Every structure is written in C-alpha cells, then in structure tokens.
Image: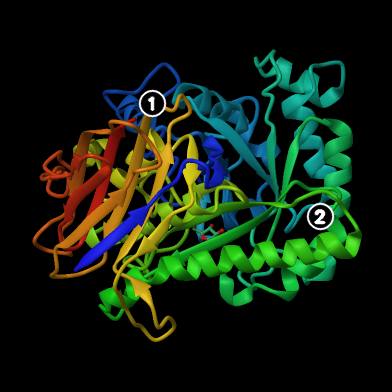
Amino acid sequence: MQAKLTLHPAFQVGKVDPRLFGSFIEHLGRAVYHGIYEPDHPTADDQGFRRDVLELVRKLGVTVVRYPGGNFVSGYRWEDGTGDRAKRPRRADLAWGDIETNEIGIDEFQEWCKRAGAELMMAVNLGTRGPEEARQLVEYCNFPGGTELSDRRRANGLEDPFGIRLWCLGNEMDGEWQMGAKTAEEYGRIACEAAKLMKWTDPTIELVACGSSHYGMCGNWEETVLRHVYEHVDYISLHSYYGNPNDDTPEFLSCSLLMDEYIRTVCAIADYVKKIKNSNKTMYLSFDEWNVWFHSNGAKLPKWTVAPHRLEDVYTLEDALLVGCMLITLLRHCDRVKIACLAQLVNVIAPILTENVDEGGRAWAQTIFYPFLHASLYGRGTVLTPIVSCPTYSVRRYPEVPYVETVAVVSDDGSEMTVFAVNRSADEVIDFTVDLTACAKAPAVIEHLTMTHADKRAVNTADDPQNVCPDASGNAAIDGATLTAELAPYSWNVIRIKL
Ligand code: AHR
C-alpha cells in the first residue's frame, strides 16, 4: 500500500497552544495517594511527593493539569483540603465509593504543579454547591490578601496567591451519574452566575463551561448552555473515551474519526450561537478528558476504602495507536481546540503506573506514554494543512477510514518539522511519501522514531517496562524534496526533519 502526504508552508491549520498537552489528576483510586503522593516512599520529597513519578511527569512535558475531578468534584468541599492536616475530615466520596482523607488538597496540589512544571486547571463544584462557594475558592486561591479567605490562605503558610488562571465550571453536569446533575437550562443559569462572580473576584481568569459528557449526548446541551454563558466563558468542554470490548481492532482504530466529528460538531454549534448572539467572540474548545478506557470497566471493588486499585487500565500497543491517532486529530484542530487533557495522569486510566511502597514501589511508563511524549516534545509550533492521499477501509460508521493518520508540525523557530503517522493496517507495510517541494531547499531526516510490536496486545509491566517502547529504527530518507519511509504494520511513527 502507498500513502502520500503533501505539505506547503503557506497552508496552515494554526499555531498549537501548548495547553494541548495537558492531563488530569482526580481524587480517585490511587491517582493522588500512592500515585503522586506517598510520604513513605524512598523517593518522597520534603512534601511527600514521589520524585520518581514527578520525573516521569516532567519527562512527558505535561503543560496543564486539571484537578480535583472529574465526578469527584461535584460533591467536593474545597475547604476540607486546606489548613491544618490533623484537623482535616475524612469523608465518603459518593462519586466513586471511596474514603477521602483530604491529606492532599489545593494547598498541596498547587505546590505539586510547580514541582511538575505544569499549570493548574481548577474545577469548581457546581453539583452539590453553587456560585458562592466557587467564588470563595477563587478568592482563597488568587486574592493577594486583606480578606478573610485570602488571609486564611496566608495563615495556612501560603503567603503568595496561587495565580490559578484556568477554571472549569463543574464537571459533566449533563450526566445522571453526576452528583447534582442538571438540565441544560439549570446548568446554563448556574454556570452563568458562577462565571460572573468568579470573574468579578479575579478578572484575569479564564473559564471552561461544561459541554456534553460524550458525543452521544452532544447537541441541545451545548446550544442551550452556550446561549446562557456565551459572553461569560472562554471555552466549552468535550469528553471522550473509547474502548475495544469486542476485539474489533479496525473499528477501534477508527474512533479518532468520531473524535474529529465531535470537534467539528461542537464548533458548528458554537458558531451558530455566536451568530444568534451577534457576537464577535469565537468560542474555543477544551477537550479536557480524552483517552482509551475499557479494560477496567466492570471490575468490582469493595466500597469505602482509601485509595483502592480503581480504573487501572493496562494499555496495549493498539491502545497506544489510537492515542496516537487522537493526538493527531487534536493537532489537526489546533485552531479551535486550545486545551486538551489526557485523562488521567497516574494509575487511573493513565500513562504512568505505580506500585504502592509495600508492593515494591516501582513506577513505569505504559504504552500510551510514548505517543503523548512525542507529541508534547515535537508537536509544538504550527500545524500544516495535511493533504493526504491514502487507501481506506470501511467500518460500521465510516465507509472510508484512511490506513494512515498523519499530520506535520513546524517548530516555532522554523528549523525543524515533525511528521506524525499511524499505520492502521494489521499486516501491510505502507510506503509513505511526503512531498516537501514547497517546504525547504535541502531537508534532512534527523530521526525516524517508530513503535510497534508483534503482538497488538503487548503491554509494559513493572518487570518488563520496556516491552513496548519506541526506537530510532525507522528507515525514513530524503531524496531531493521527497521523503520516503516504510510504516510498519500497526505502528506509531515520528519523523523529524531538519529544514
Ligand atoms: O476520568 C474518569 C471519569 O470519567 C471522570 O471522573 C468523569 O468526569 C468521567 O466520566
């Protein structure tokens, strides 16, 4: 099979917002406790944060981390996670059926973000609480001092305001599983009032309104909510998880086309509301939960325990291929999608897994770690419009799924271009050519990283953490202005070119 990508430097999708490489930490399972925080761990720092995990997070180049939920936030009292730790309450978290000790809260997590080199994206509870508590949290976090709440923060030993810029107005408020779920009208009103109070408290913040929980619920929800909040918020959220419960890999690997359709649909709805409002403001998208998630579904765990092994999906090669396709899809929409969060970051449906200290205390990178790493390292800059000609296959929903998913990003200084490509074929090597005629005089290949495995279900484990990982064995070469490369069956490819 043959596939061709044609590029021209003048044909650009747009500039990538670095916040496209975000992630998510929820108080859920072992994401916080035994994930990022384990004071007894040999690598624990002065605040009890695991340095082995911090190292992996920094390596990934995660730019922004959404916190503290997720479903958890819809019953959360943010005050529980502030001040004297000895006095913090243990509470039953109704979202996941776990006990929350509140040993970690905003006081500590803002410090973890600094150590991870990431921006904090804070979510407020619009489920069981409302605009006033949301406003109070902004005041606690961002007010310099001189009010009861900001002075409370200072008395807690945190003199400097946290300066949190990015705030989510609740989480998945359309879902019946959500504590305090709402109709679109109810949510639109409350989100609008919360947005006003929060921005009056700190006019520099940016706000994300809840879109639908998944594409199946998209449509009326976005339209109604946006009619209420259009002039008060900056982003509308999207969430998507895909799985392969029936072991239908061709169908599974086509799920990034659903993500693409979802993004295009939300843009269309947002632009429709823009017209109705006669507004000149463009609504941007925050894809603040996305991943593969299905391996752990149906696992039954006892209720009301602290930090159980919940939602710990072990990711395969084929999962990494879909994650690669989804990253390419996000890049191709970088003109509208400004924020995206791989959900989640540690242990819970995550690229990083850890053992508790009494299980051995190791931390390692799952298969999905690598496409994210590469996109985060080499996907910053300007995305060129991909003109792709490629054979296709058909699945139930889509008659034409391209065998190659691809995009190219030119670095900010113009010295490098990276082509990302996934081969969706199980057994065919694809002869891939990239026409660079318009791009550079004498381009040269820096390296062709590739990740594949003879077994599409291969995973990484604590004992074999490098079983599925990339190497520089790809054969990309340039002759004149044409790049040629063989894309191995079921492979993730990163071709770096010197311009
Ligand atoms: O990421 C896991 C859960 O998925 C989140 O808590 C929720 O927002 C979504 O349904």
- Return the x and y of residue 398 as percentages of the image width and height: 42, 81
| Residue identifier under label 2 | 191
Question: Residue 415 — which label?
Answer: 1
Callout 1: 10 Å neighbours few (<14), some, many (20+)? few
- Return the x and y of residue 276 as percentages of the image width and height: 88, 65
In the image, 118: left or right of 248? right
Decide: is 157 above or below 350: above
Q: What residue type is labelled 2?
A: Ala
Mark 1 CB near ligand 1 (8 Å cut): no
Decide: is 325 above or below 499: below
- Return the x and y of residue 31 as percentages of the image width and height: 42, 45
Q: What residue is rendered at 74% in x and 39% in y? A: 206
Decide: is 146 above or below 331: above
Q: What residue is rendered at 67% in x and 30% in y? A: 164
Helix, strand or loop for disc 1: loop
The CA span between labels 2 and 1 is: 44 Å
